[in-house]
Image (cartoon, coloured by chain):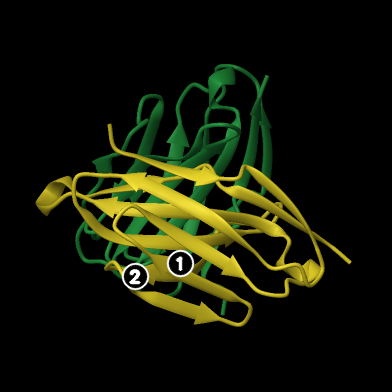
Chain colours: A green, B yellow
Amino acid sequence: NAGVTQTPKFQVLKTGQSMTLQCAQDMNHNSMYWYRQDPGMGLRLIYYSASEGTTDKGEVPNGYNVSRLNKREFSLRLESAAPSQTSVYFCASSADRTSSYNSPLHFGNGTRLTVT
Amino acid sequence: EDQVTQSPEALRLQEGESSSLNCSYTVSGLRGLFWYRQDPGKGPEFLFTLYSAGEEKEKERLKATLTKKESFLHITAPKPEDSATYLCAVTEGGGNNRKLIWGLGTSLAVNP
């Protein structure tokens, strides 16, 4: 059972470069989320998608874009990377049909991104 | 301001030495409280959901309890494999304004 799969696991970018983080889940979940985790800041929501075809901003959306490609896949794009975007990025999914947070989140193992 | 505070930040136990982790919250309307475990280099893994004061959940050596202001994660006779960071998160608000607020975690180390 794969659960939530994220690629790549590690990435180093130079300031101004762009990249897309990929996420796929095989649990037939409706909602998907992108978080970043930084020391002393905890988990912060970047974007979420309550269903295929919809996306909404979280706490820290600036500098990011997302695409809910289909029910399984939710990608996060950095158009012009900045050092402040150095972080660990987690994708998660849940069975919720709305942004209700009634169901637990299932997380991938993260992408460790360094921007120099 | 809505917030979730976990204490202690770090805890070191000897194998078999029971203890408790605390998650206190100040939110306008609690909808649910989640406990997660996070191992180094991994994503958080769901442990428990608690919805109302007085509720308790158990799993192996872990027991989670909930009051109107805080939750405790009791660890009985811990083993080295229980070493991890334990995260607490609280769902609050209603309708389209529902939010999930995360604590910073307690880092637990269990020595053999």
Q: Residue at x 19, y 60 (%)?
A: A98
The disc numbered 2 marks a residue on which chain? A
Circle 1: is it few (<14), some (14-19), or many (20+) Cα within 10 Å?
Answer: many
Toward the viewer: B48 or A55?
B48
Q: Does the CB distance between marks 2 and 1 fall below 8 Å? A: yes
Toward the viewer: A51 or B54?
B54
**Label 2 in the same subunit as label 1:** yes
Helix, strand or loop under label 1: strand
Toward the viewer: B33 or A94?
B33
Quadrant in which the N terminus of chain B appears: top left
Q: Residue at x 46, y 54 (%)?
A: B88
User: What residue does disc 1 label?
Assistant: A25
Question: Residue B50 occupies which quadrant of the picture?
Answer: bottom left
Name the amino acid, label 2: His
The disc numbered 1 marks a residue on which chain? A
Indicate the position of residue B39 as horizontal and vertical percent values.
Answer: 68, 58
Residue A106 is at least partly visible in this image: no
The tag on residue B85 is none
Helix, strand or loop under label 2: loop
Quadrant in which the C terminus of chain B appears: bottom right
Indicate the position of residue A53 as horizontal and vertical percent values.
Answer: 22, 54
Residue B102 is at least partly visible in this image: yes
Q: Residue at x 54, y 20 (%)?
A: A84
B108 with respect to B64 (left or right): right
User: What residue does disc 2 label?
Assistant: A29
Toward the viewer: A15 or B85?
B85
Name the amino acid, label 1: Gln
Q: Answer above or below: position of B80 versus A101.
A: below
Q: Answer above or below: position of B82 versus B1.
A: below
Circle 2: is it few (<14), some (14-19), or many (20+) Cα within 10 Å?
Answer: some
